[in-house]
Image (spheres, rainbow, N blue to C red):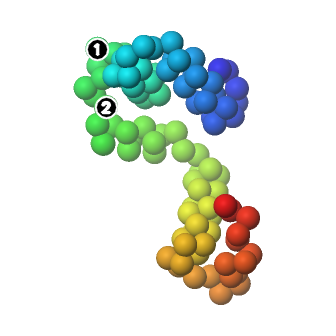
Amino acid sequence: MSSENSVVRTVAQHGVYIRHMLSPIGSNAIFCCNFFGVCLSHIGLINKRFVWRLHEKRILVPEMNKINVIKELLNVKHNSASVSVLDLADIVFLY
């Protein structure tokens, strides 16, 4: 649960916290509180604005650049955008 990789860390935390909760509502509440860094008594703070601000704080510029490239490639793949140097055959590997 202390991996530097955010995906590995999230999957590990998900397995630990969710697996031990019997109530679906309780497991979702604990997961949200852990993910957003709030205690259960302050779960009401989690709203769209709170999540967006936290997202902006957590995302680093290099990661955001990678996310934007992936987003653009997915748009090309699903015919929502076009790129003159690539065609669909060049980005099929994204599946």
- Image location of residue 9, percent across then percent down: 63, 28
- Image location of residue 52, percent across then percent down: 38, 44
Q: In this view, does 94 lie above or below 49?
A: below
Question: In front: 68, or 88?
Answer: 88
Specify the label residue 32 is tagged with: none
Q: What crowding class fits label 1: few (fewer than 14 Cα within 10 Å), some (14-19), or many (20 or more)?
A: few
Amino acid type shown at disc 1? Ser
Q: In this view, does 68 lie above or below 45?
A: below
Q: Is residue 47 above or below residue 78?
A: above
Q: In this view, does 57 lie above or below 17?
A: below
In the image, taking residue 21 as reference, residue 46 lies left or right, namely left
Which image quarter: residue 10?
A: top right
Question: In front: 61, or 44?
Answer: 44
In the image, taking residue 22 as reference, residue 58 lies left or right, namely right
Do we see residue 44 in this rendering? yes
Tags 2 and 1 in contact by the CB under 8 Å rule? no
Do we see residue 37 in this rendering? no
Q: In which quarter of the image is the N terminus?
A: top right
Whole-angstrom CA distance, mark 2 to mark 1, is 11 Å
Amino acid type shown at disc 2? Ile
Q: Name the residue under label 2.
A: 46
Q: Mark 1 points at which residue?
A: 41
